[in-house]
Image (cartoon, rainbow, N blue to C red):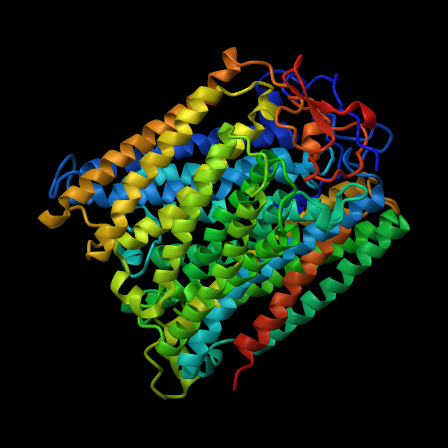
Amino acid sequence: MSEAAIDADAAHEDDDHGHHDEPFLGHHFKDHDHQFNTGKLGIWLFLGQELLFFGGLFCAYAIYRGMHPEIFVEGHHFLDVNLGAINTCVLLFSSLTAAWSVRMAQLGNKKGLMLMIALTIACAFGFLGIKYIEYSHKFHEGILWGQLFAPSPEAMEHAMHGVEANSRLHIFFSIYFVMTGLHGIHVIGGIIAYAWLLKRAAAGHFGPNYYGPVDFIALYWHLVDLVWIFLFPLLYLIH
Amino acid sequence: MSAPAVDVGHADYLKHAKGILSWLYTLDHKRIGVMYLIVTSVSLLLGGAFALLVRAELFTAGPTIMEHDTYNRMFTLHGAVMVFLFIIPSIPAALGNFVLPIQLGVKDVAFPRLNLASFYIWVLGACFLMWSMYDSAIDTGWTFYTPYSSDNANAVSAAAMGVFILGFSSIFTGINFIATINKMRPKGMTFFKMPLLLWSLYATSLIQVLATPVLAITLLLLTLERTMGLGIFNPALGGDPVLFQHFFWFYSHPAVYIMVLPGMGVISELIATFSRKRIFGYSFIAFSSMAIAFLGFLVWGHHMFTSGQSKTASIIFSALTFTVAIPSAIKVFNWLATMKGGAIWLTTPMLYALSFIWLFSIGGLTGMFLGTLNVDVHLHDTYFVVAHFHYVMVGGTLMALFGGIYYWWPKIFGRMPNDKMGRLSALLTFIGFNVTFFPQFILGSRGMPRRYYSYLPEFQDLHQISTVGAFILGVGILVGFAGVVMSLKNGKKAPANPWGANSLEWYCSSPPPHENFKVQPEATDPYDFSGWKWDKRTEGYVRKASEA
């Protein structure tokens, strides 16, 4: 909801909020630079609050890992490191295309911009697709969060090799599902934002003077990527 | 530095566009501020009604007008409505939204659409909270402590999601204010030449952006705990209920500074204007706002001295809590020093400002008692705590809000509020407030626990005094609202500058034109009152001829 709303610069015809000769310059800004710099500060503040939003979860992770390190060691055996690694690569590549889209907008290259946005969206869908495979596999085997945690004997045997699992193992999966789920919702948010950008890019709104929204949404996308960069080792790569 | 010309003559923002849709779709910060003023005032009346029901019930021991279950719901709704719907958004989102851009001489906040979005997010959050009341009113207290909140059958999830949504409204307002102050100050206005209201709104916004998301994730986890059985907070599933308290207070302690800092900003403006004197110790007041915002993040554990957290943690939190007293006291001393030797003009806003200083001093000093580790173990969860935080939060926010409303009302609506009713209201709220809450200090120190619907016979007299005070306070608030609302019909037309203040909002007409200023003016010195003289004809202040 926020990326779209934070973009203060499109014309607001309804309230006489636009410069009459500059369709995408808000009436309360001096020029495009002023508007861009203000928007940039706004998106950084938004990313700051996102960090604290996820920070609560990372804090819960740290506390439970400190109190019950064994459930994290046991839990990671249930996760598929290969799929996680592929997803990491997919997101890293999408960060490249997101950064490239900003360059394309700065150069006024409409085709290139649309291509980069489309690639970013494709990667986001790819990520969600792989995540769907992981999730449905876990659902199928009863590897769920909290009180619903009831893994099938085969899944248990496969991960634990006959060793008795810790009685709090379900909390690892609560943390796993909340963190990856919330991250997934942010990926969906990114797809919506990029779909909106794609529409505006097709209408030829962006160019060397005006490319703020492309830049800001790319920053948001990098953050979504960065959160995953932390989630992957913290959840999948524990020894 | 030449003073900006008084800007009059354009269609004002109230008449700029007509029809209800022109309000609902508006991007104008002034109209959004007015809409916030309306909805937060309604919330105040609603929360106040719950408060009066609570106090009426406590008039006698045992059931007076309701049973204990209903009572538990009433105090929960009182707390939740007052904190989340009224106190947090009231001054920043209503008065701040209106005044901040004009004090900067700009046409709008940095992100007008985000501003409108934050208003509608507030409305959505309020709908969730209202729906939870209708469905089955929560009785967890406004703090939603686990494990009770994670396994009772009431609409805790709806209420928690309501507060979650309201949080984003608060975050977006904060983002908007920080970006506006950082990037849109007029020529000549460095940070240390801003009106102090802007410093306090800046500090408030930082807390809103940095603390509120932690509350958001906490309430999201609580909702998931209830709907999906996560087991992170619920001890029955191996979770840790005290972790919820840590998360909750990591937000909610800084949040008390979201409640009081904007009020302090308003008071700084009022004290300087009505003492006709340069504010004393400008940079100390400015830095103390930032210091309060910073220290506010380090003291949340003082809510949890009896929760079983480690002794070391409690001792450190207790010590850090005392440090907050330093910037708070700096402000009070600076206000007093500003008044010393000033030509004090006892207008309605000034009466509210003086009331604020009195109440905040009592509230702040009793906070020191509670920050003291061993004293707190005795006073924890008693009426002493209730009295303390009402002195700070109500004394802080309510008095500053009314002072601010009476101060800026002429600017907002172009009508002078009714002065007699304003003074009466200031008097009634001051008396009513003290009669309500001072006895509660005594009750608490004698062991009356909070949130009980009944009590021992020896507490009856003090409870009855407190209840009488609450109704006086209620009347005072109604008179206060009547004094401003009635002026819309028959109030005197307001001049551009009724108070002789020198920040930029007094340079545009009352009410301001749609665009505030055609061209961004240069900064003025907000605490130099020498350039204005009283004009009998308009009954307001005009620039002295020598400077025109």
Residue B321 horizontal side relative to residue A114, left or right: left
User: Quarter-wise, where is residue B379 in the image?
Assistant: bottom left
Task: Residue at 69% x, 62% y: name it.
Answer: A222
Task: Residue at 31% x, 50% y: name it.
Answer: B386
Q: How many numbered dots are placed on residues in this image? A: 0
B271 vs B222, nearest the viewer? B271
B208 vs B376, nearest the viewer? B376
Say if A123 sits above or below B191 in the image.
below
**Picture coordinates of residue A107, whole percent (x, y):** 90, 52
**Picture coordinates of residue B25, whole percent (x, y):** 62, 27
Q: Say if residue B58 shows up in the picture.
A: no
**Picture coordinates of residue B427, whole percent (x, y):** 38, 30
B335 vs A38, nearest the viewer? B335
* Rendered-image quadrant of the C terminus of chain B: top right
Residue A52 horizontal side relative to residue B473, left or right: right
Q: Say if residue A89 shows up in the picture.
A: yes
B396 vs B93, nearest the viewer? B396
Task: Residue at 59% x, 65% y: name it.
Answer: A130
User: Quarter-wise, where is residue B82 in the image?
Assistant: top left
Outermost residue on the front side: it is B341
* Rendered-image quadrant of the N terminus of chain B: top right
Residue B544 horizontal side relative to residue A65, left or right: right
**Picture coordinates of residue B341, whole percent (x, y):** 58, 41
